[in-house]
Amino acid sequence: MNMTGRRGFLQICLCFTVLSLALLSGSAFSQNGGELRFCLRSEPKTFDPLLVDDDASLSIRYLTGGVLVRVNRHTQELEPELAESWKVSNDGKIITFKLRHGISFSDGSPFSSEDVAFTMKRLMDPALHSSTGDAFRSGSGAVSTKIIAPDQIAIIFPAPIAGLDRLFDQVAIMSAHSPKKEGAVLGPFMVAEYKAGSSVLLQRNPNYWKKDSQGRRLPYLDSIRLDIQANRDVEMLRFKRGELDLINVLDSDYFDRLAASSPGLAHDAGASLDSDFIWFNQVATAPIPEYKRAWFRSTNFRRAVSQAINRDDLSRVVFNGHAQPAVGPVSPANKFWFNSKLKAEPYRPAAALQRLQADGFRLQNGALFDKAANAVEFSIATNAGSKARERMAVMVQEDLGKLGIKVNVVTLDFPSLIERISQKFNYEAAMLGFRNVDLDPNGQMNIWLSSAEDHAWNPQQKAPATAWEAEIDGLMRAQASSADSKKRKESFDRVQEIVFEQAPFIYLVNQNALSAISAAVEGANPGILSPQTFWNADRLTLNATTRASR
Amino acid sequence: MNAGRKVACVVVLGMCAVSLASNWIAPFGYAKQFREAPSAPPSREHWLGTDDVGRDRFARILYGTRISLLLAPAAALVSTVLAALVGGLAGYLGGTWLRLARGFTDLFLSLPWLFLLITVRALMPLNVSPLVSVLITFLILGLLGWAASARVLSTSADALRNSDFVLQARASGLHGSRLFFVHVLPNLKPVLYAQFWISIPVFILAEANLGILGLGVAEPLPSWGSLLRELEGLISFREEPWRLVPLVLLIVVMTSFQTLLSNEEVTA
């Protein structure tokens, strides 16, 4: 090789090296560091992970709290986190966790079974009034813990709890010894700064235990800034300007506008667990005329109303197609618990009229009358401010008008509505919804048990008013006391069938999980479970080049 | 009457006339849902497009204008009559009655009216037709909106009570209701007119405020408040400028009402 050739070879080597370095640095540029920014829609009420009850605090707990097991928001499967493995006893009363070694809290204090025992003791303290703790209250008697070894602990409950292991997805472990209390965390981020009414700054937890497949310590991000912003218009404007990286939950109107201008940023993850529904007041002591109570208690009347509602139109018109006609209390998005034999009630006004006629109703000059010649007219109350519900109510009003039923839509401020439907029972029908309910049917015990406060159509019954409510009571109790998931599924499938047949709630739609994610965010995989966009926040990265170009 | 007032008068009367003829001008009606064309842009069929559930926006604006322009004066009449009774009588009687009335009026004025409206509305029966609901909404506005006018009227009536002609009438043996109705009330007319006219745009705006919160006129009846709710979430005016029509109408009507009042009436 002569001098020219050698110089040429050196130049090629140099170019290759420079190129490799550039590529490597580019890769590192997009995989490490940076600050993710998005909005909380309200002020967090607490930073104590055991007292969390509001959406904003839930988001912070998810990002900062370390849990023993985690429900994967994409697969809906339970995965090990701080616990390497766990075992629920056959009687469903004891759960034993084997913990990971060498894990420290964000302040450096070591993690052991003592911390789990401390957390459970505090969680179950009646004086704390923790709603997370309420889910673990299965019967009279105290919850106890038994430290088997520094890395092994058994938690003993006085009565069986169905789906016990999944409940630990909500329990962020606190340190038993750290003076920082809730400031010492095991999650990927820790609270670094809180400006009331303005923002919460989360910084990377330097002691976070997880590593990626290449052995690099997670999380990739340096920090997350959560701006407190209730106004959705402002949130969308800021997202469009590039000041925000995510919008966790998006309305269908905003979604379509964003999809039209920037199709790659709007994400529709399909039907969520959210559902909207109507129910009729069946309370015996409610101040409504007796003949109306008789309509509302008639299965034929409720089913006829259900059949007369065009759910496809509701999905298409109100949600611009970003919703699915609802089947029942479980969304098809809930992969395990949904009863796939059931289908959404189709729009059949002729069949609805037949049902009504079977109950003695008659259509005369475009108006429907009952056996005693009372014109069929009732009001549907819903909360003011929810445009989607108001639109649905107007469409239901028109659909039922075709059957000769006169519906008066009433919008009330939320406290007044709640007072009417849960204390005074001074209403005829109401339209509300469930938001992102628990996957496990145990989360719905407060709705389906006839004695429950949230048994909306006829709450706090001393004994079930109807045979089908008695059957639901039995099935819900059976599934709650069984550790056999197959038997639980059979019981809850039957509950869904009864609810479909009896229509105490007339389910309308399951809204889709809509979100917005900036092109600068890499690794996002929006799902239907909360938190939809940042459930894998520890693996999200920011592409600074893309971000700068926005 | 100056040119501005003439124009304002023509605008208000013109809008009243057009809204009264809405049955003929807008054949679709305000409630019919064209579900195949929700949120449609203006077309030959729907001049101002359709709303979120496919209702003709032009028809809804016409009917909404009719409701706001007819019922706001009715509410203004109710509030002015109440104000005349409370303020006028208290001013005429004077002394303790005047102090009591002023105290009561001040107390009423200090209440947050929107909160009061929402509370009173929440107590109303639910199962009423949209037409009855709209009448109730404006009646509540009228019943709750008398206090400011009553205060003005009590001051005017108090001044009249001590005027020479009232003293002369008293000296001539005229007392009680006859003195009030023959001498005091006719002299309060300019103030009553002014209060009546001032109240109309106030009630139109009050209903619009309730409507924007979703607590105004019941569906499917339209009103300016419910029509203005469509502007919620509108990020760019350029995208759908036809959605601004209710806002433009509201501004035109408010300006016209303000122009109709002469400076003297406003001062009165």
Image (cartoon, rainbow, N blue to C red):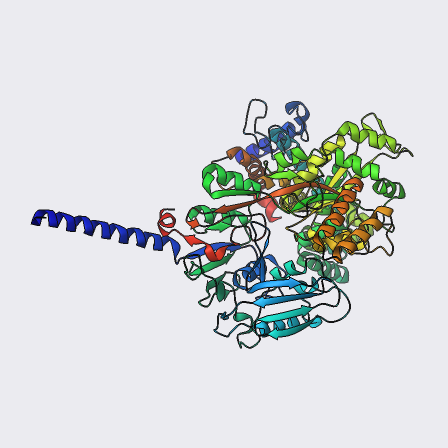
Q: Position of residue A123 (x, y in %)?
A: 65, 69
Does any portion of residue B163 appear in the rendered image? no
Q: Is residue A179 above or below residue B110?
A: below
Residue A95 horizontal side relative to residue A107, left or right: right
Q: How many marks?
A: 0
Q: Position of residue B75 (x, y in %)?
A: 71, 43
Q: In which quarter of the image is residue A368?
A: top right
- Residue at the spot 55% in from the left edge and 24% down from the top edge: B43
Q: Where is residue A169 in the image (x, y as percent from the top left)?
A: 60, 60
Q: In this view, does B168 lie above or below B71?
A: below
Q: Position of residue B249 (x, y in %)?
A: 57, 36
The one nearer the camera, A363 or B114, is A363
Q: Is residue B164 above or below residue B130?
A: below
The one nearer the camera, B63 or A39, is A39
Q: Quadrant of residue A407?
A: top right
Does any portion of residue A279 appear in the rendered image? yes
* Farthest-out residue, right: A372
Residue B95 horizontal side relative to residue A312, left or right: right
Residue A493 horizontal side relative to residue A267, left or right: right
